[in-house]
Amino acid sequence: KITADTILCCVVGNPVKHSLSPQLHNAGYEALGLPFVYTAFEVEDIKSALIGMKALGIRGMSITIPHKVTAMRYVDELDPLAEKIGAINTVVNNHGKLKGFNTDCFGAIAALKEHTRLKNKKIVILGAGGAARAIAVGAYSEGAKITILNRDVKKSRELARLVDGEGLPLTSIAKLKEADILIQTTSVGMHPQISESLVPVDLLHKNLIVFDIVYTPLVTRLLKEAKQKQCITVSGYKMLLYQAIKQFELFTDHQAPVAIMETALLKALTKKGTHGRK
Ligand code: ATR
């Protein structure tokens, strides 16, 4: 029941109507009986939105496209990992003091940690955009050895420098032979281009863990082929789930009901014609 004591959280972005975050967070609040409500706002001016957050006492904000970089300027404090990544997807309001976090980073690491430790593991990351950056910084902080492969090699090298790794062009994909973990962060394979994959099947070996952050379709061509080669596979929706789990915990100070939120997410993903990639 919504009362004068209800605590508000929300996602801001543009566009934002497709966001699954309200379903995910509200399912968690309901399960735990917390006096929280989570809504979505289509926002052009992120500075005003963050000033408004303080004025209205909004407890938590998820920040999405196109505001993840700009929003950093308008918070009072930054989590060190978010600062290194150079983007935030989460703002927590502690009695009028705004702190920025990047839970995309945590989400990707948590998804992988269901299957493996990361310390000293050789990780190949395909892509060097915003998502790759959050994941690379997270994996590096766990002690992984990182190779970035990107179409634009300048971006590979730049990201590699940030994580003491190696930056190569996408044509060096044979690097996968020596890798323990592959993380696919580009939009290749995402709906409607579902028949595409950047990875030749013969480079998939059974000791490779394959994580594709694309979640529409839930099983991409890459993941399908990796399964056929007996790789352990990690679906992109897990990153979406765990970044929200971390936000839930930052906003409410309660442990998130993971199974319930996972069910809510999968239900929303199979019902709606959503397209995405964290
Ligand atoms: P995000 O912030 O969501 O990660 P982004 O910053 O636009 O998105 O990054 C997209 C990544 O996917 C980039 O690494 C991009 O490669 P380039 O830097 O060479 O542009 C990669 N990407 C997108 N489409 C691709 C394609 N068809 N083949 C290979 N890489 C692709």
Image (cartoon, helix red, strand yellow):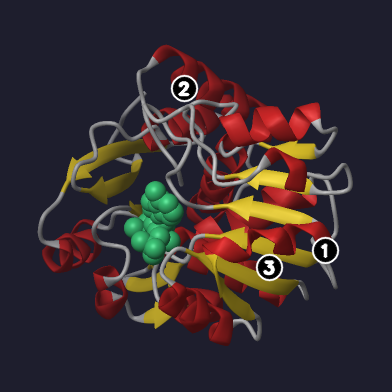
Residue sitting at 84 percent across and 70 percent down? 119
Few, some or many residues within 10 Å of mark 1 (<14, 14–19, 20+) = some
The amino acid type of the residue labelled 3 equals Ala
Give the secondary structure at mark 3. Answer: helix
Q: Is residue 15 above or below residue 127?
A: above
Ligand 1's image quarter is bottom left
- From the top left corner, tell me how far across and down residue 86 is, in percent: 41, 77
Question: Does residue 218 appear in this view?
Answer: yes
Dots 2 and 3: beta carbons under 8 Å?
no
- In the rendered image, which residue does mark 1 sit on? 178
- In the rendered image, which residue does mark 3 sit on? 139
Res 16 → quadrant: top left
Give the secondary structure at mark 1. Answer: helix
The amino acid type of the residue labelled 1 equals Glu
Between 151 and 224, which is closer to the camera in this rendering? Answer: 151
Using residue 213 as the reference point, say whether residue 90 is left or right of it. left
Indicate which label's residue lies in the foreground, 2 or 1.
Answer: 1
Res 143 → quadrant: bottom right
CA gap, disc 2 and disc 1:
34 Å
- From the top left corner, tell me how far across and down residue 228 is, in percent: 78, 27
Among numbered discs 2 and 1, the one appearing first in the sequence: 1
The amino acid type of the residue labelled 2 equals Leu
CA gap, disc 3 and disc 1:
17 Å
Give the secondary structure at mark 2. Answer: helix
Among numbered discs 2 and 3, the one appearing first in the sequence: 3
Residue sitting at 25 percent across and 49 percent down? 12
- From the top left corner, tell me how far across and down residue 162 is, in percent: 55, 84
Q: Which mark is residue 269?
A: 2
Among numbered discs 3 and 1, the one appearing first in the sequence: 3
Q: Outermost residue toward the right?
A: 207
